[in-house]
Amino acid sequence: MTEPAKPLNFIEQIIKKDLEEKRVNKVVTRFPPEPNGYLHIGHAKSICLNFGLAETFGGDCHLRFDDTNPVKEDMEYVEAIKRDVQWLGFQWAGEVRYASNYFDTLYEWALHLIRAGKAYVCDLNADEAREYRGTLTEPGRPSPYRERSVDENLALFEAMRAGECEEGSRSLRAKIDMASGNINLRDPVLYRIRKQHHHQTGDRWCIYPSYDFAHGQGDAIEGITHSVCTLEFADHQPLYNWFIENLPVPAKPRQYEFGRLNLNYTITSKRKLKQLVDEGFVDGWDDPRMPTIAGFRRRGYTPASLRRFCEMIGVTRSDGVVDVGMLEHAIRDDLDKNAPRAMCVLSPLKVVLTNYPEGQTESLTVPGSPNREDLPDRTLPFGREIYIDRDDFREEANKKYKRLVLGKRVRLRGAYVIEADEVVKGDDGEIALVKARYIEGTLGENPEDGIKPKGVIQWVAAHEHARFEVRLYERLFNDPEPDAGDKHFLDSINPESLTVVPDCLGEIGLNNADVGAGYQFERIGYFCRDSRAENLVFNQTISLKDSFNK
Ligand code: ATP
Ligand code: MG
């Protein structure tokens, strides 16, 4: 066991004490996603916490799919979730587990409760059951089926299992307390009839356990010592414990709750994210604007940046809203330190260097990144014709404009100082090209005549470069709380969240960019090569400027 250097969060404190007092010998945690969508940034927090606890205390973390509702689940999601967990840098102990692995045991345990007079088959339909359940202020009323005999319940439950009952016509319920102040204890449903094919168990079952009847028991079967979940499950804890106390479980896990991650400008609900995908507001679960782990990966976020973010936000007992700027800060910080630099011109404007001999070219060498000596140098071809960004040239400008102006000088990054002489306009009145001169002897040196350039701009050679599409992203929502109160999140979708810039030019080395590898396009932002597009496409990961904490 290695002692973490940073202060322990409250769950780590509990575990440390449990180990010291020998209440547990080895920590076992689990991450229990339902395979009904892709994982989002909130899940990343839960993953970092559960796998992190196992790492910190030399224990195990299981990956267990909570697959009790075949209606909404799919193997695509199972595969995506496994990939995302591994990409974040974690490996589950042993095989992937499924709640459905335990369906036989859960069925036996349901019979156990029936025999003990602690469960009954109820024929109320969903609406009636809701009505009988009462409200937060009113106690519930007992179901008319509550006092069925053990034998009748066994026979009816068997009939449910055998497929002899209609969906929704019956359920198996625990017999606990219809007057409890905790609605979860008002005879909760243990089994529902669902005549559905299941991605793991096929057509073997037509009754499926509820989340509550499966979760804690799965924990007990797997020997989970600390079952960590989000705060909304705090009200389920008495029920969790009721099952553990009333069933012949092999171990007694305990549940602990922490505050879920909420991010401003962001939605963290699989159901709502699925709606964005299904209704075409985004281009799939891994659209770079999605707050899914797959979306962040495609956008160029690194696993380290997401883990770092989860570390920054910490683990507390209460919910709160985190500024998305903090997440952006984490990736920017990582890429600033690690990403190789490259030059890119989003809106190319040709510049002809009239004093540079026609047909002559040379190769200039620049560092891979000022922050990383281990990166190889880059080679930049240079010649008589180059492209600069249209935004970096003006015919006239005031002193604040530190780029190229007619009659003035600017330095080309990693190359010469140039001076603009003349513009040539097309029939449309637009500037078609700029005629300029390069100042000899200015590679890494200031001009001998003492007239210093105003600023530094990026450029690419006209005779040798990469050509590609760039996709610029803004936040997907304009509202900091897109789904707060009675707001509908679709109302605040940002129509300008994606800008496609075709025909950008970049330094030649970008032709060999690895998919997903991040670059700093100098003076523009951080980008990575898209993993889906057949042509060369770069996704903007994040802008250069950091507004967080400033
Ligand atoms: P969603 O509402 O997006 O469907 P969920 O809780 O239903 O989320 P699960 O697949 O059941 O999704 O979640 C797996 C685990 O991830 C659970 O333990 C859950 O508590 C945790 N989790 C889900 N959302 C968050 C969040 N925003 N912050 C922290 N943990 C989360
Ligand atoms: Mg859930």
Image (cartoon, rainbow, N blue to C red):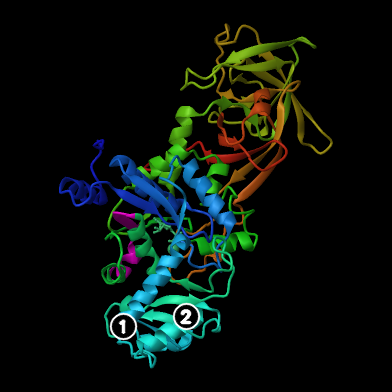
Left or right of 234? Residue 521 is right
Taking the magenta stretch, the answer to whether it contains residue 231 is yes
- Please state the horizontal and vertical placement of residue 268, each as a whole percent of the image: 47, 58
Which residue occupies 46% across, 48% down?
Answer: 95
Which residue occupies 25% across, 38% down?
Answer: 6
Taking the magenta stretch, the answer to whether it contains residue 103 is no
Q: Say which of 345 and 66 sits in front.
A: 66
Which residue occupies 38% across, 89% down?
Answer: 132
User: As shown in the figure, which amino acid type bears the numbered disc 2?
Assistant: Glu
Q: Earlier in the sequence, mark 1 or mark 2?
A: 1
Left or right of 208? Residue 5 is left
Q: Badge 2 is on which residue?
A: 158
- Please state the horizontal and vertical placement of residue 47, each as a whole percent of the image: 40, 49
* Proximity of marks 1 and 2: CB atoms separated by less than 8 Å: no
Q: Secondary structure at mark 2?
A: helix
User: As shown in the figure, which amino acid type bears the numbered disc 1?
Assistant: Gly
- Please state the horizontal and vertical placement of residue 217, each as a whole percent of the image: 35, 64
- Please state the horizontal and vertical placement of residue 402, each as a whole percent of the image: 56, 27
- Asked if residue 448 is positioned above or below residue 170 in the image, the reply reads above
As measured in the structure, the alpha-carbon distance from the residue carrying label 1 to the one carrying label 2 is 16 Å
Left or right of 103? Residue 513 is right
Location of residue 463 by image quarter: top right
Q: Badge 1 is on which residue?
A: 117
Which residue occupies 32% across, 54% down?
Answer: 224
* Residue range corresponding to the magenta coloring: 223-238
